[in-house]
Image (spheres, rainbow, N blue to C red):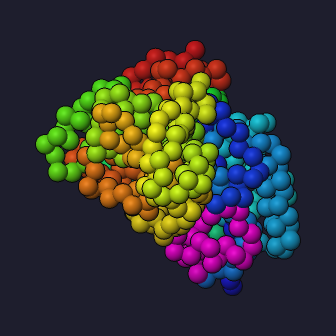
Amino acid sequence: MRRRIAIGGFQHETNTFSPLPTVWQDFQTPGAWPGQTNGAAIFGVFAGANIPIAGFIEAATDCDLVPLLWTAAEPAGYVAQAAFDRIVTEMIDGITKAGPLDAIYLDLHGAMVTEDHEDGEADVLRRIRAVVGPDLPIAVSLDLHGNISRDFFERASCVTIYRTYPHLDMAETGARAWQLLSTLLERGKPFARAWRQLDYLIPLTAQSTMHEPCGSLYAMLPRLESNEVASVDFVIGFPPADIRDVGASVFAYGTEQESVDEATEAMIRALHDAEGDFVDPMTDAREAVREAIRLSAGANKPVVIADPQDNPGAGGVGDSTGLLRALLDEGARGAALSMLWDAQTADAAHAAGEGAEIQVSLGGFHPQTGGAPIETRAVVESISDGIFPFTGPMYGGSTANTGPSACLRLLHDRADIRVIVGSARCQNADQAMFTAFGIVPEAQKILAIKSAVHFLGDYAPIAETVLFAKAPGSNPCSIKEIAYTRLRPGVRLGPMGLTSR
Ligand SMILES: [Zn+2]
């Protein structure tokens, strides 16, 4: 008998420190990912993409899938309650109309905060459970940047989570959600399951699975699985969220409660043992630029400087001028920065045309978090509609839509810097964020990149070295400097850090 499974997705990573609210329109507009996609269009739009729902669809071949809706918005501040209610209502309408179902699969993020709910995903499940009851299996896949509450754990039947950061295994995580769900359906009764939160927070810049200790910690997960333990996964947490349940937590599912508990404890123990191994790579922006100039002098590959605190992929605005100002002040030459969110300057460049010299006021629309605009003359080197294919290992297969965009060469007495400006916020996790505008990344001395970790997937292979600059932005990465007011008690602020009261 073919199973009938409703599938949908609703992803948001909410940074409660971002000055930008997340509204309904943000879920409609495509960015690095498609905008809201309804019903059967899901099958065409997501085919071949590195997105969880695509992996689930590809794996669940012997089922009848009932597509609901899939939507995501670029990470930013609190999700407007009206937007959340409207999207969840549409999803539930689809479930109601679907008729009898054997299960539901949801492609969620795990760090959504709405105006009314600290754990948005827990409320998605509460509302769906109110319609389908407590027993229908609901499988969920999550980003590893989830901040999970007990309510969420109790309402989901089984959960799989990305095991890589950069997220190279998003589609694979959707496929694993199908495998776990099919094991559950065959079992015919709920899994034995366990969930435990970690008692210290881990900064984003120390979370990459391309570095230690996260590489080894995530590599442990398959070894914890056995005949009695069907899966073990953990979210590592998304720190820029002032909520009770921020931080890492471990999930395990299987057939024997004792074995599932043991696997969960083993993962928590390994995280405790690794606590002293995390390093915060951030240095002051000016020091990072001076170091990049020194290192690039004798290098034949670019020195990459990341700007994690203005990473739009974690709710940074993308208009911070801190790193650009350091590059100008230190007289960096042969440098290129991508991408500064500045629709006004992009429009001015389009109006003036390629080759024109214009006066610009770059970025700085939120000076309280990202510094003042930079006033300068610039030459418009190229203009673009901002629609181009991504080519790197994380977003490859998807199409970018950064809106009207331009490459500017800043006219400065000492520095020689080109800046890509775009009209939509977009993390630079892909070399196409330079090449689409005529810049050859390998030919630059210095690449300045608004990303925290995802850029490593495409840029580490071409980099002489990678530096992490601490510049102003609304994605605070130094945990001990984050002013939490709602964090649960007993949590250490960073590995080996202070304890929250
Ligand atoms: Zn993530």
Magenta span includes 347: no
Can residue 344 be seen here? The reply is: yes
Which residue appears at 65% of the width and 52% of the height? 73
The answer to whether residue 326 is above or below residue 231 is: above
The answer to whether residue 400 is above or below residue 319 is: below
Please provide the residue range marked out in magenta: 33-61
- Of all residues, the one furthest to the left in this rendering is 298
Which residue appears at 47% of the width and 21% of the height? 480
Image check: 380 left or right of 216?
right
Q: In the picture, which quadrant includes the N terminus?
A: bottom right
| Image location (x, y in percent) of residue 190 | 65, 58
Depth check, front residue: 342 or 126: 342
Q: How many marks?
A: 0
Can residue 473 be seen here? The reply is: no
| Image location (x, y in percent) of residue 455 | 40, 50
Magenta span includes 55: yes
Q: In the picture, which quadrant includes the C terminus?
A: top right
Which residue appears at 42% of the width and 30% of the height? 325
The answer to whether residue 156 is above or below residue 484 is: below
**Residue 139 placement: quadrant:** bottom right
| Image location (x, y in percent) of residue 339 | 48, 48
- Of all residues, the one furthest to the bottom in this rendering is 1
